[in-house]
């Protein structure tokens, strides 16, 4: 199991216990910046909603971001709690602006959580994905239907530029999915609504060699 490094200043936050309970192999170190290191070069800066607001107002956030980017290859800002419901006097526009700055200008993903337990679970999941990947392939389309006619339509809808209406027209014209897939460009032209660009894209996909 990979180590999840926790900054020594986070040891009183209760996060160590939550991470350990979630199965993480926690190691405490004194980090120059960042609160957690999930894998080599991947760091998380955790802030409660209150701390996030305060760090915007005193400009501390922007110095931290600069240090994090200079130190780690991949950085995440984890914000715990409702950023727009704090005791701070900060304007909502300032929070929105800071979030936009972090994500758009600095290119740092912001991860939102609702509680310390959620933060721990999130970091454990992030670490697992960083090391192992998702663990399964995401299908490009939804579950296929069970009866044959919808299955044939489902298959033809997988062709580029072919939606439900075009798939039905193609199947009606050629009689089967096999007929559609075997059709020549000239034969496709006989189907109303199937333009030259769609025909070219279909043939390109069908003839593409892996």
Image (spheres, rainbow, N blue to C red):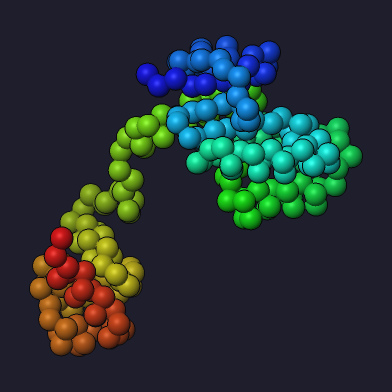
Residue 129 picture location, percent across and down: 41, 34
Res 63 quadrant in image: top right
Residue at coordinates 46% horizontally, 17% vertically from top-left? 24
* Along the line of sight, the residue nearer the viewer: 133 or 146: 133
Res 78 quadrant in image: top right
Q: Is residue 116 above or below residue 20?
A: below
Q: Is residue 171 above or below residue 58?
A: below
Left or right, residue 111 beside residue 173? right
Report the label total: 0
Q: Is residue 27 above or below residue 78?
A: above
Q: Which quarter shows the N terminus?
A: top left
* Along the line of sight, the residue nearer the viewer: 16 or 159: 16
Residue 69 picture location, percent across and down: 59, 43
Residue 73 picture location, percent across and down: 50, 41
- In the picture as drawn, the residue positioned furthest to the right comes out as 89
Is residue 207 visible in this depiction of the protein?
Answer: yes
Q: Which quarter shows the C terminus?
A: bottom left
């Amino acid at each position: 199991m990979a180590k999840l490094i926790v900054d020594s200043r986070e040891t009183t936050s209760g996060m160590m216990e939550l991470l350990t309970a979630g199965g993480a192999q926690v190691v405490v170190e004194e980090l120059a910046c960042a609160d957690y290191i999930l894998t080599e070069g991947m760091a998380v800066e955790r802030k409660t909603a209150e701390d996030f607001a305060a760090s915007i107002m005193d400009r501390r956030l922007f110095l931290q971001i600069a240090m994090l980017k200079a130190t780690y290859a991949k950085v995440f800002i984890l914000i715990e709690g409702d950023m727009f419901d704090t005791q701070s006097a900060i304007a909502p526009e300032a929070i929105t602006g800071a979030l936009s700055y972090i994500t758009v200008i600095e290119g740092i993903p912001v991860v939102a959580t609702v509680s310390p337990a959620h933060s721990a679970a999130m970091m454990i999941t992030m670490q697992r994905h960083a090391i192992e990947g998702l663990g399964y392939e995401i299908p490009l389309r939804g579950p296929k239907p069970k009866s044959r006619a919808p299955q044939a339509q489902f298959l033809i809808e997988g062709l580029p530029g072919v939606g439900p209406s075009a798939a039905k027209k193609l199947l009606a014209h050629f009689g089967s999915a096999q007929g559609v897939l075997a059709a020549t460009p000239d034969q496709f032209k006989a189907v109303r609504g199937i333009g030259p660009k769609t025909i070219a894209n279909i043939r390109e996909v069908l003839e593409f060699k892996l």
